[in-house]
Amino acid sequence: MSLDQFREKTAPSLAARATIARLENELIAAQNQRDDADQASSDIVQLVVDAVKGDTDEGPDGELYEAMGYVRKSERKSGLSRKAKVVETKPAA
């Protein structure tokens, strides 16, 4: 088999590998674009949430705030927890 024949027979494999490499690079670029767009969207969503919290009719305890997936202020737990005291027993002698 000559070098030219070898190259001709292996060309489809090399072409497929080149296509995969190009597509992987495009995927990485698209994911980076998505991440940048998500950050911008997150900033806009936070502005809307802040507007709802600042609304005198709704606020952080309103139904709209809860419908947006947040926990109403009145439904939040205080965070206070009282740990049970551990009583140590002495081993029998």
Image: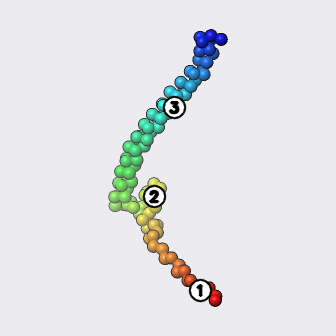
C-alpha gap between disc 3 and disc 1: 66 Å
C-alpha gap between disc 3 and disc 2: 37 Å
Mark 3 in CB contact with mark 2 (< 8 angstroms): no
C-alpha gap between disc 2 and disc 1: 49 Å
Can you give x and y, in whole percent of width and height, for residue 53 in the image?
37, 58
Q: Residue at x 48, y 74 (%)?
A: 81
Q: Provide the secondary structure element on which disc 1 rests.
A: loop
Q: Which residue is mark 3?
A: 24
Q: Amino acid at mark 3?
A: Glu
Q: Earlier in the sequence, mark 3 or mark 1?
A: 3
Image position of 6 (left or right of 54): right
Q: Provide the secondary structure element on which disc 3 rests.
A: helix
Give the image's coloring scheme.
rainbow
Q: Residue at x 62, y 10 (%)?
A: 2
Which tag is nearer the camera, tag 3 or tag 2?
3
Q: Which residue is mark 2?
A: 70
